Image (cartoon, rainbow, N blue to C red):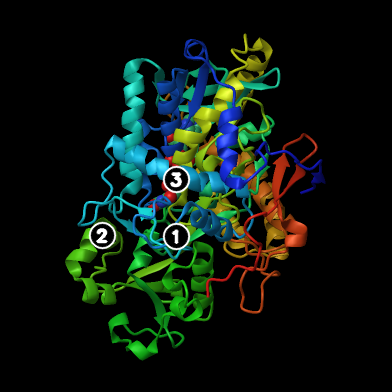
Amino acid sequence: MKYTEGPEIRDTKAPAGPIEERWEKRKFSAKLVNPANKRKLNVIVVGTGLAGGSAAATLGELGYNVKSFCYQDSPRRAHSIAAQGGINAAKNYRGDGDSIYRLFYDTVKGGDFRARESNVYRLAQVSVNIIDQAVAQGVPFAREYGGLLDTRSFGGAQVSRTFYARGQTGQQLLLGAYQALERQVAAGTVTMHTRHEMLDLIVSDGRARGIIVRDMVTGEIERHYADAVVLATGGYGNVFFLSTNAKGCNTTAIWRAHERGAYFANPCYTQIHPTCIPVSGEYQSKLTLMSESLRNDGRVWVPLLKNDTRAPGDIPEEERDYYLERIYPAFGNLVPRDIASRAAKNVCDEGRGVGPGGLGVYLDFRDAINRLGRDAVEKKYGNLFEMYERITGENPYDVPMRIYPAVHYTMGGLWVDYDLQSTVPGLFVIGEANFSDHGANRLGASALMQGLADGYFVLPTTIGDYLAAGPFGDVDEEAVAEAEIRVRNKIDRLLSVNGTRTPDSFHRELGKLMWDYCGMERTEESLRKALDRIPELRAEFWQNVKVTGTAEELNQVLEKAGRVADFFDLAELMCLDALVRTESCGGHFRAESQDADGEALRDDENFAHVSAWEHTPDGPVLHKEALEYEYVKMTQRSYK
Ligand SMILES: Cc1cc2nc3c(=O)[nH]c(=O)nc-3n(C[C@H](O)[C@H](O)[C@H](O)COP(=O)(O)OP(=O)(O)OC[C@H]3O[C@@H](n4cnc5c(N)ncnc54)[C@H](O)[C@@H]3O)c2cc1C
């Protein structure tokens, strides 16, 4: 796949000056919209997860006219509901040395120095407000005996800053955002459009002015207009077919925006989560996460001997290798996800993996149960243990869990500036859908923090600065008609192929290819193979896919086919991005670039930048945004 290089991105709109004052400065310099004018301004928010739900509720509360969209039957079924372990905040309730600066530092380091300092600092500042907001909504965070909110530890941090509600933190936070959203629906500031899928973005006179959606129940194609559009459509990990994401997660909304002019940043940065239930067979279509919070008390180990088939209970202590504790004594089982995942892969590659096919390591609670008692462990993790037992048939109170890394999160996404605005004026992108704050590796419990920071606090300020110049008048009819025709043509094309293979079978093959060639480890050879094979598979898709049913009805095969078609294009860009970035950093591990200990070896001289890809008819154009570190010194990451 050919690409060219375009001009660098020089201005991200972050204010200059001391880092702790930048967000205050931006808030003060942002233009305000007076309350009477807010009523005349329309905003579309696509997505009702933690990012979109909190944004739509807050914008409604501020007085804007908001239209909210999601493809589920209820906003509260967004994928955010699956989040288990917790949400970070620099509250320092424990007095264990946490601070805004430390959260900032951990996040920049955890992201392997590939995130923007200004954004990350703001995230750490806002984190403390999120907890207050959620508590005020009644989110039932776990509390400790004294009544304060309880915290636990997550990877990449030596302090305990993760707030949680058992293993259901996302669900409880989403219920909070949902309540706030429904309150605005009742107040008439937000109109809710469930079971509507955005299929195109309307760009008129260079501004994002609306979306084309398909009513997923009737098949009707609708046009919706606004003065600004917010995409909060989540991540694209399902390009790998097997992932911990909800089955519906897809790339269509952001890919369409990319085709309409929004740059796509760092598409190759994928997070492989170390603690998931291993794949159990060929027909599996979903992987299940076992929350990182389990690594607070669970100890990860494999047998010292290769091909050891003894039951875990029969392997004596001295014949076990607690390899994370051995290799990384300072962080132990709580090293960041990229490091823990690669370490698991390495011990399995050595032949010391456990379970079928040797693709698993133990996560053992024996010591925690002996130390704390079964009740205490059950209180903290009961629902996760139950989930594990239901899926595997094994009781983790009695035998160690078996876990293996799996695709979990995408740090890449649409490029946004400090205001969370994309390269299309009026198109804002929040939550997992943007690329903004995690660099090359996201620390656990930071996605909920970022989604809610964006939705409750950042976007509602920055979008006002843009909307102050609105309303933007009539939308160009021609632009709308073109967008609608594109949507109709694609649907017709999918339905007319009438081949022999299901969209799912193509998706499975694409996913396997991505996992094998652009997964936990990538090489020039593997990426070139993928870049050769993806266009062939895509061509076969367009000649041989079978989409049953019609466009004028509920048609999940059609929905799926449209999403898979977009995954092909995204997959190609991911592999290109991974090929061009010949360094290793965070979750992007190029086997050619590793140090003597097998750790990711960055090349700061050539790659301390964000790769922002522009879509053009002549192929992708790469724009680089240089990353500068004024506060955290760039070093080779060490968790030893
Ligand atoms: C199993 C699991 C556990 C996790 N646990 C944690 C955790 O403990 N802590 C943490 O910080 N993070 C966790 N994460 C990550 C975190 O859950 C997600 O990153 C985060 O919830 C994403 O929120 P979001 O609002 O950006 O998107 P989502 O919650 O994915 O919401 C996307 C929304 O966009 C809508 N949408 C998408 N495309 C379209 C379209 N074309 N048209 C209309 N609507 C559309 C969907 O309907 C949905 O409403 C976990 C992730 C997984 C998979």
Q: Position of residue 11 (x, y in %)?
A: 73, 38
Q: What's the residue type where badge 1 is placed?
A: Glu
Vertical placement of residue 44 versus 177, above or below: above
Ligand 1, seen in the image, is in the quarter at: top left
**Which sits in the foreground, 509 or 80?**
80
Q: Would you name the residue on which mark 1 appears?
A: 282
Pick whichever of labels 3 and 2 is earlier in the sequence. 3
Q: Would you name the residue on which mark 2 appears?
A: 380
Pick whichever of labels 2 and 1 is earlier in the sequence. 1
**C-beta proximity under 8 Å, tags 2 and 1:** no
Vertical placement of residue 226 versus 284, above or below: above
Q: What's the residue type where badge 2 is placed?
A: Lys
Vertical placement of residue 66 versus 423, above or below: above
Task: Name the secondary structure under disc 2.
Answer: helix
C-alpha gap between disc 3 and disc 1: 41 Å
Q: Is residue 127 left or right of residue 509?
A: left
Number of residues whose C-alpha sits closer than 10 Å to that of mark 3, classed few (under 14), some (14–19) or many (20 or more): many
C-alpha gap between disc 3 and disc 2: 23 Å
**Which sits in the foreground, 302 or 153?**
153
Which label lies toward us, 3 or 1? 3
Q: Would you name the residue on which mark 3 appears?
A: 127
